[in-house]
Amino acid sequence: MNIDPNIVEDAARELYIRALKVLPPDIKAGFDQLSERESSETGKAVLGTMIRNIAVAEDTNNLLCQDTGVPIYNVTIGRNVDFDGATLKEAIRKGCERATKEHPLRSSVVHPITRKNEHTSTGIRVPVIHFDFSDQPDEFRLEMIPKGSGSENNSWLRMAIPAEGIDAVKTFVVDCVLEAGGKTCPPTIVGVGVGGTSELCVHMAKMAATRPLGSHCEDPEGRKLEEELSAVVNKLGVGAQGLGGDATAFAVHVELAATHITMNPVAVNMQCHSARRASAQITADGVSYGF
Amino acid sequence: MAHHDITTPVTEETVRSWRVNDTVTLNGTLFGIRDATQIHMFDRGRTTRFDLNGHAVIHTAPNVRKVEKSDEYPAGYAPVCIGTTTSARMERFSRPLMEQYGVRMIIGKGGLLDDSLKAFQDLGGVYLAIVGGTAALETTWVEAIEDVDLDDLNPESLWKFRIKGFGPLLVAMDSHGDSLYSHVREEGARRRSDVLAALGVAAK
């Protein structure tokens, strides 16, 4: 299968706008579950407003949240796919830029030192583009995540040591949730990276925070840890918007990587309640959009 | 837990009568302000021609469309999506906003900290919590972008919105030293050891 960069550019444009407007069904279901269980009156009202906003965004064809985020594109390429890597990256960048100018969207991206905004949602190394490869024949999947800053500003890495054991990991997650309070726009998906190297650990926390509700860590120990943490996170009293109550998080997700004999790294990254993502499958027959 | 439906600006007396857990709906004028706006106003000596006295500011940087100036779009901007950002980054600007510009209400999400709470007590102000991430809904409460200042900082300009039925917003920090966020922080610290125990960790 040959990948046409024009199709990728159009898909990259479309995905940014789609992601900003329609929440995935798993997140909508997550809201329903949290609402049913909420015991605080304030919490119920806040969740009710969030649910109403999802409907207003769809009815008025508007963005769910003003924060257009830092654009992230995850590309998964299967077997027997022909593409030119450099052209592909350029196509994604152009699509992101076109979405910003043509919709128009607020460009939330600035130079880190001059703070200059080019009003393109792009800049040095942004959009963030990750490539991965699958063993599926003729697969080309493009996922777009607009990562909001409220949740992204609350990201942590701790290079714990082996003597501190798994207790250090659990304590760190609990303390990050408490420290974040309402700043991350809870209810969140709490993403936890365990193991790896420092940058891999932080990357895994982001992968965990942005994967669908109902998905699980592939490693049985990781899955056990995410179940344990998910069971207690809503007992901390932070609540929706940090105003108190039960709905602190939809879930805690964990991703693991092997690590060094001397290391015990843990990272936390959170996804806000506007847990936006959209994806496109590009095949020889055309493009199909989903979440 | 009273509800207050008001038109801006408001007096110090009015704001001081509000208590945590009251709700407020605003009408009239609302100013949008953000990190860069306040860095330029308070660190780089810039000023605004707007009169913020007795008014509300919201921590925002909206999505807008540039259009021809008209009665409908007096500032040459059409609102696309107007929402709210995390307030805590702008903590150190609460007092100067109130002292130098007479601002009475700060609208945001996630809460402000102790210095702001002290400023609300000393000077007569409140923090009104909006539900963050609900910008599509919030946009329906904005009638027009009436004016804009410091627009070289776009989208972090100083925006003047005309609003109707903006709320209900929750009084989350009042002028009597009460803050819902302090309650939640204290409660979280209290529950931490039970949660860690449930995870099989001895609390330190």
Image (spheres, coloured by chain):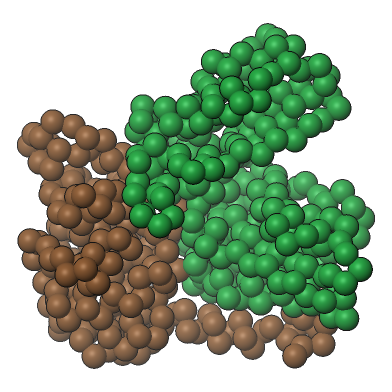
Chain colours: A green, B brown
Left-right relation of B104 to A273: left
* Residue B137 screen position, x and y as percent: 37, 47
Can you say whether B88 is above or below A217 in the image? below
- In front of the other: A291 or A58: A291
In this rendering, does residue B22 appear at all? no
Can you say whether B155 is above or below B46 in the image? above
**Tally of marks:** 0
Q: Quadrant of the N terminus of chain A?
A: top right
- Image quadrant in which you'd find residue A170: bottom right
* Residue A263 screen position, x and y as percent: 84, 70
Rendered residue at 84%/80% (across/down): A164
* Residue B140 screen position, x and y as percent: 30, 45
* Residue B6 screen position, x and y as percent: 18, 66
- In front of the other: B41 or A261: A261
Rendered residue at 58%/17% (across/down): A5
In this rendering, does residue B51 appear at all? yes
Q: Quadrant of the C terminus of chain A?
A: top right
- Image quadrant in which you'd find residue B111: bottom left
Left-right relation of A139 to A51: right
Can you say whether B55 is above or below A116 in the image? below
Rendered residue at 35%/90% (across/down): B177
Left-right relation of B138 to A96: left
- In front of the other: B101 or A94: A94
Rendered residue at 49%/43% (across/down): A124
Left-right relation of B171 to B163: right
